[in-house]
Image (cartoon, rainbow, N blue to C red):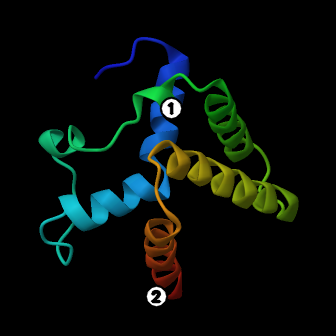
Amino acid sequence: MIPKDVQTIYNLLGQISSKLCSYFYRECLISNPKQYPYLQHYDALKLPVNVELLENERFTSLIHDMISLKKGNKDADSQITEHKLNAEINEFVYEAYKLNPLEIGVIEKYFEKQVDK
């Protein structure tokens, strides 16, 4: 899928940057995580993309907000806002894929362990 409009590109970027896609990439697509992790073109085709979410204007708006925030200052307030935006973006993705609380817990716990390392 090659998006032709900027809105879809931003939306797709948001989905790919979500915890769900990051988890899927790290756990399902990297065959040897001890080596340098890389993504082959055929692996990119396996990344989950929710087509319905591509058309969600609120989700796209959140992605725009995140990009604008990352271009701006890095003060304490922006870090709090970034954390809240990330949480809201991930919630959108979890809902779009109809993940249950147990599945969400597995993903969230995985990333908590990554922070602890």
| Amino acid type for the residue under numbered disc 1 | Leu
Secondary structure, mark 2, is: loop
Q: Residue furthest top?
A: 4
Foreground residue, 43 or 20? 20
**What label does residue 96 carry, if any?**
none
**Tag 1's secondary structure?**
helix
Q: Furthest residue to the bottom?
A: 117
| Marks 1 and 2, the one that precedes in the sequence | 1
Q: As rendered, which of 86 and 67 lies closer to the eye?
A: 86
Residue that badge 2 annotates: 117
In the displayed image of the protein, which residue is found farthest to the right?
A: 77
Q: Against 86, is 109 above or below?
A: below
Tell me if residue 37 can be seen.
no
The quadrant in which residue 62 appears is: top right
Dots 1, 2 in contact, CB < 8 A? no
Image quadrant in which you'd find residue 31: bottom left
What residue sits 47% from the left and 28% below the top? Answer: 52
Left or right placement of residue 35 versus residue 5 in this view: left
Residue at horizontal 13%, vertical 71%? 32
The residue identified by callout 1 is 53
- Graded by Cα atoms within 10 Å as few (under 14), some (14 to 19) or many (20 or more), the crowding at tag 1 reads many
